[in-house]
Amino acid sequence: MICADGVSPLGTVATLPSMRSQRGGFPWRTVPVALAVMISLVALASAPAAHAQTGAEPQAEMEAEMQAEAKSMRLFISPHPDDEMEGWAAVDEVRPSAYTVFITLTHGEATGYCQPAVLAVSLQADLGERPPNPTPAGKFSPTCAQARIDSWLAFHDGAAAVTSSAKIGAAAGTTLTLGPVPGLPQPTNPHASIGATRAQAWIGPRGARLALDLGDGNLTTAEVQWAIKAVLALRGGALPNLPLSTMIAASYVNKADDGAIPYAHPDHIAETDAVKSLAGLAGDGGVWIATSPYDDRADEAFTLSKSDYKVLMGVSSTLQKRKGAHQVAFGWLTRGYWPTGKLPLAETEVIFPRQATFRYVSNPGSAGQPPA
Ligand SMILES: [Zn+2]
């Protein structure tokens, strides 16, 4: 039932291993920049040891870094239009001043929740769930794809109430044609509603939202590589001409650990493999890939405040009214409501946690240092 992709968790309940200790340290530029943006004495007092090693930077240098970051671009990429919360905790943490392009690689048209008989049971509008618009006519139907992108936009609008870097500013919808990309085949999608080389786009002054149509359930690593390169090729045209500083992959995968919620959707694996392979395109911010909190390769975790998580994922305690942006927008994509909690655990079936854990892959060609 998770992620509305038609792949169920294996559901094994295991004794949880101890939460691995988080390795200290962000990539070397992240902490000073985040601190400068927040201008918070409290944050300064609680900065990780990595900051202390760099020493206090002169004000002018910090301001120069902030200006450079604001003149960069970052990509926040999800495979399906409902995966965002798997990595949302990083949105206001990793290069938050950059011009952000929020990308869904597919329209999510393969979900069984677009079947009218299923929707009749899953949609609980009386509890605050936003009805899909248009009403889906069935799995793989164009109306299913349209409804999922409509929900995706509604989530972003709601999330922007507490996630400042999700505010893209005024943007009118348009459709873009992407590619070709040298060295990579054009993508295909047998169920495409707008075309595998086209994207719906909402481009604002501070960020953009792009909905690609690469195929729910048939995404490949090469297609995701094509998508990233094709989007970056829009710079200087539909998108501002800014250097890429980082990529965040909200594409949870866990194939190894029994304690964390298992998830091995091939579209998610295709995205994580592609983003990792293209770390060399990112600037000194490298790439961040959502993973299990028990992943030995994990480098860092970001945690949403309880109040922000409530705005994003909240459900009222008595009547179970859907309050959070994700619950309201994507409530029709599950029976009941989406489980909530701090970590993505198998026993709680939480896949959209308050704390998101990431693997960090540095750009091998940059001067940036990987986490300790
Ligand atoms: Zn997904």
Image: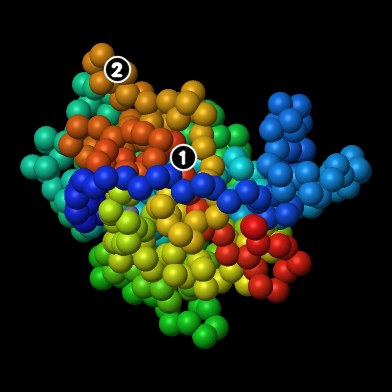
Q: Quadrant of residue 168?
A: top right
The disc placed on residue 54 is none
How far separated are the C-alphas under marks 1 and 2? 21 Å
The residue shown at (74%, 30%) is 45
Q: Residue at x 36, y 44 (%)?
A: 344
Q: Is residue 228 visible?
A: yes
Report whether 26 appears left or right of 83: right
| Front disc: 1 or 2 | 1
| Count of marks placed on residues | 2
Helix or strand or loop: what does disc 2 sit on? loop
Residue 122 occupies quadrant: top left
From the viewer's perspective, tell me whether residue 287 is left or right of residue 297: right
Q: Residue at x 75, y 45 (%)?
A: 51
> The disc labelled 2 sits on which kind of residue?
Ser
Task: Give the answer, above or below, for where 365 lies relative to 314.
Answer: below
As drawn, the label of residue 317 is: 2
Mark 1 and 2 residues: CB-CB less than 8 Å, in contact? no
Residue at 46%, 59% in the rendered image: 296
In the rendered structure, the answer to whether residue 299 lies left or right of residue 205 reads left
Residue type, label 1? Gln
Q: Is residue 189 above or below residue 259?
A: below
Outermost residue on the bottom side: it is 183
Percent x, y of residue 326: 37, 35
Pick whichever of labels 1 and 2 is earlier in the sequence: 2
Report which residue position mark 1 lands on.
Answer: 355
* Quarter of the figure that contains the C terminus: bottom right
Direction top: furthest residue? 318
**Residue 232 showing in the rendered view:** no
Give x and y (percent) for residue 94: 62, 48
Q: Determine which quarter of the picture holds residue 6.
A: bottom left
Q: Position of residue 288 (x, y in %)?
A: 54, 57
